[in-house]
Amino acid sequence: MKPLATAYNQRLLRGQAPSYERLQARFAEDGSALDAKPVVLHCGWGRVLVGHTFPDPVCLANELLNEQAGERDIALYVAAPQQVLAQSPQQLFLDPSDTLRLWFTDYRPATRVFRGFRIRRVQSEADWQAVNALYLARNMLPVDPTLLTARHQGGPVYWLAEDEDSGAVIGSVMGLNHHTAFHDPENGSSLWCLAVDPLCSRPGVGEVLVRHLVEHYMSRGLIYLDLSVLHNNQQAKKLYGKLGFRTLSTFAIKRKNGINQPLFLGPGPEVGLNPYARILVEEAYKRGIDVHIDDASAGLFTLSHGGRRIRCRESLSDLTSAISMSLCQDKSLTHAVLSQAGLSLPVQQLAGTADDNLAFLDEHQRIVVKPLDGEQGNGVAVDLSDIEHVQQAIEAARAFDSRVLLESFHEGLDLRIVVIGFEVVAAAIRKPAQVVGDGHHRVVQLIEAQSRRRQAATDGESRIPLDAETERTVIAAGYTYDSILPAGEILAVRRAANLHTGGTLEDVTEVLHPVLIDAAVRAARALDIPVVGLDLMVPAADQPEYVFIEANERVGLANHEPQPTAERFIDLLFPHSQPAP
């Protein structure tokens, strides 16, 4: 232990946490008497209760029970958690998160410089909106800035990471100065709410935010930085371990509520489900609907409520008929049905002889090749203008279906519209996988790093395959896998904007043009399918022009959070389970 560490901190690290009385005595020894009342700091999403500033367990337990609806309070540095829990065992629980500490004497500055973004404080209403959008995307509680404890009273400081090119907020973190907050004789600080945009392609955002907070508090003469991290968050723990954080033997207590439910109930039957099935099962649990997991690896589960029983495979349910499902799976049938409904579609034909394929290419100049029955972007090659590439793409597509389609290629943005119960619930522009150069790493290394980030952000559902389509896209842009991409240069490495091949989403539900809404509903009715994801090419989401590409009978509803896709899906299956307005 470094000399700056006090005897109290040494006892904490050895697991010898003192009692409330001894903690108060410790404050008095350091000449920093406790404030007249316990320290409670509002952070916008809930309150941090500084455990050892409370006079006794009863007082701390009662304050936790004062938690407001929709918020999440946490009592940290609880010296005798069993005494606090004993006051209200039905309503309080021991948080399974780990507390980690970085002694600033252990800190080593970064040896690598991450570029393309800047760190600054949250300053405006627009900043708060951007930070809250980020937190919602990470399933975290948003911040109400009007509730924050004032900074001069020890309240929090929020920082954000801003992309230098787009101006988008790609990360955020909160810090507390313990000396200002409660005259901490140990001169500490703490980190909260670290989040990075799951769609961010810039490397190092989380690390830079943590380092910024460390160096900020070091410059103010503080000694350490604490944080709380979920016990099973291995990705975060790897980062903190790299920076020198060590486990601290202290405890945190929370109140049982819907937000904290997974922490005090433990793993449920939904363990092993992919994100697309899990989001629906969790919504069913909230409604009191009985859930039986039939096959977690296949995303298969059964919901029962009020005498009604429905089997689902992710968002595909008993409500979708076999005919509707086959109309979506067979892209030529999809084309025929939507054409009869008067919707705008690309020209299409089955791949045939080399001469037939060449004639189609000569007529349209740029075409798309895809298996007749396929999903998740498998076997799809986009924007082909050379017959040799067309023939290669046809052979690759036949690995997924012996029948292969040729379609005319249409410029534009890839728009996914989700229709549930013949109402548009969500819409998003899908962007192909891309990497950002740093002037040091080869293209293949950048792809592998971005693929790892996408896998981590999607529970393994999204990755960038190093296949012929990726290599062809890289070569068409004037590079090879071994090229060093200049710093700041953005390189699209896929043509198709499918999430399973590393693509990302930008929500456009609020700006969707009425013509596109009408076209999507008409398409869903023509296919007679209650839940469907419709893919269109558009110049912009707020413009009326479109070309339908395909329909997906099993749409990934989790990709469209925070739009209420899971809620509307359960509404459709069990309308009487809807919460009272």
Image: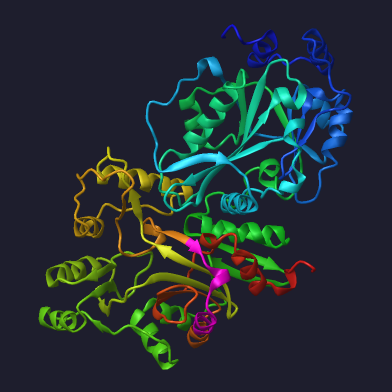
Q: Is residue 405 left or right of residue 150?
A: left
Please provide percent x and percent y for residue 306.
74, 70
Q: Is residue 520 magenta?
A: yes
Colour setup of the view: rainbow
Instruction: Determine the image quadrant of residue 579.
Output: bottom right
Vertical placement of residue 445 versus 54, above or below: below
Would you place residue 477 above or below residue 68 in this image? below
Q: Range of the magenta residues?
A: 506-521
Q: Residue at x 81, y 32 (%)?
A: 85
In front here: 415 or 531?
A: 415
- Asked if residue 380 is among those painted magenta in the image, a careful observer would answer no
Regarding residue 196, the answer to whether it shows in the image is: no
Q: Nearer the viewer, residue 383 or 484?
A: 484
Q: Nearer the viewer, residue 238 or 507?
A: 507
Q: How many marks?
A: 0
Give the camera-side residue of 129 and 257.
Answer: 129
Instruction: State which quadrant residue 409 falls in.
Output: bottom left
Quadrant showing the N terminus:
top right
Q: Main secondary structure of the magenta part?
A: helix
Residue 257 point in image, percent of width and height:
76, 47
On-image quarter of the C terminus: bottom right
Q: Residue at x 29, y 56 (%)?
A: 493
Q: Quadrant of residue 224?
A: top right
Residue 505 on image: x %, y %: 46, 61
Q: Residue at x 63, y 15 (%)?
A: 13
- Asked if residue 561 can be seen in this view, the reply is yes
Residue 227 place in picture, x, y as percent: 62, 30
